[in-house]
Amino acid sequence: MSAATSPPVPSATAPAPSRAVRTARNGVAVVFTLNGLAVGSWFSRVPAVREALDLSAGRLGLLLLAMSVGALLAMPTSGLLAQRLGAARTVTLATVLVAVGLTVAGLGATVAGSVVVVAVGLAAFGYGSGACDVAMNVEGAAVERRLRRTVMPRFHAAWSLGSVAGAALGAGAARFDLPVGTHLAGVAVVVLAGTVLGARAFLPQPVVDQAEGTADAGPRARRRAQLAAWREPRTLLIGLFVLVAAFTEGSANDWLAVAFVDGRDVSEAAGAAVFGVFVVGMTLGRTAGTVALDRWGRVPVLTGTVLLAAFGAGLAVLAGSGPVAIVGVALWGLGASLGFPVGMSAAADEEAHAPVRVSVVAVIGYTAFLGGPPLLGLLGDRVGILHALLVVPLLLLPTLALVPVLRPPGAAEPTPPAQKN
């Protein structure tokens, strides 16, 4: 297997990564963090936007759908864009859309007072965020290969920390009555400037073209490559795995706090704290899970984390006491932490095809964020939101059959070092 397609396995004799690779790693971490900051900032001000536009819950849900639709429209083409322009330029252009969309959405709510303007801003924000998501995952996988150790989950942990920071800044802005438009425009400037600097540290462009000598491939050839990726069984099965991983994570993001408030009769503050336990579990899992992945490989680690997430989600719903249920939430977060980032790494195992395959997997996976919340909401109307969350373990257990698909093609997984007597 060539160096371009080798999985990131640690080796005692492997050369130390170059300074350029280490710099690119830091640049990717910055881009992930700032993308999370933008998303967290927006969602932290949704209550203020709802009040400014005087929206019902149903109309607010339809408005928020504009962002998800924008993201899904971006993903089928963003792989081709990353292949043509390179990850750095794609991330930069996408973040221009993120910044413009965030600003338009904020000013549309507080200055124009127009649902249409906000929807246009959210569609642009979603499109830019979706395109950036694909390109930064492609770049993260390229850096991971050159480091020859697992780092993708840590990039996603950086995204989580950025979203938490965005939520905290939003809470502070709301506390001091800072107008939504002013707040989000300021965040947009910071995100755009920081992302431009971070993307400048990316690996030399174009990574894929250097590996395959396809710099002069025309649009028709790239479209054929995109369509071919949609016919690859491994890519589609990875997408299905990522779909369930995204649903496992997204269901907690959307409904966990509400489920504990309604189903366990806790205060709203306590419900938010319970969600915080889940986020902490996710962040710890993504930070420490890289060590486990390098030591034991994807298949055994993901098998364990899928089982842990299923057990934790079931415990969170069915436990007879609040403290035990919170332990279940923590286990749920730990177990859900690795599925999405490792799925993206698996889609990018072969560098020459990474952009189009990552975009296919992203399209499949992100449908969970689009369809999951309303489906759980409808089920919650019948059985209660808390018990509706039992769908999570029911989906996770059959997903164990998909875990072997994520093994790097044509390569054995790392094995634990032999014990010395």
Image (cartoon, helix red, strand yellow):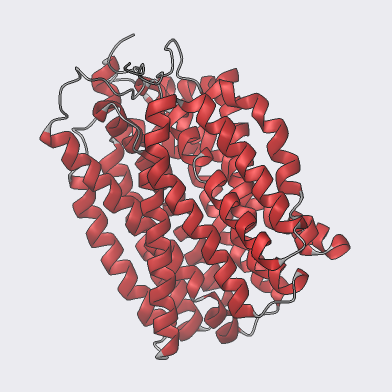
Question: Residue 262 location, x and y as percent?
Answer: 75, 73
Residue sitting at x 35%, y 33%: 150
Quarter occupied by the N terminus: top left
Depth check: give the residue in front, 269 or 194. 269
Question: Residue 81 location, x and y as percent?
Answer: 37, 37
The relative height of residue 255 versus residue 209 in the rendered view (above or below) is below
Tell whether 283 sits left or right of 327. Answer: left
The relative height of residue 114 versus residue 375 in the rendered view (above or below) is below
The relative height of residue 236 versus residue 184 in the rendered view (above or below) is above
Look at the image and tell me whether residue 101 can be seen: no
Which residue is farthest bottom?
Answer: 177
Residue sitting at x 44%, y 10%: 410
Tell whether 127 sits left or right of 193. Answer: right
Tell whether 2 sits left or right of 55. Answer: left
The relative height of residue 105 versus residue 123 in the rendered view (above or below) is below
Tell whether 323 sits left or right of 155. Answer: right
Which residue is farthest left?
Answer: 19
Question: Residue 407 location, x and y as percent?
Answer: 49, 20
Question: Residue 85 location, x and y as percent?
Answer: 29, 36
Quarter occupied by the C terminus: top left
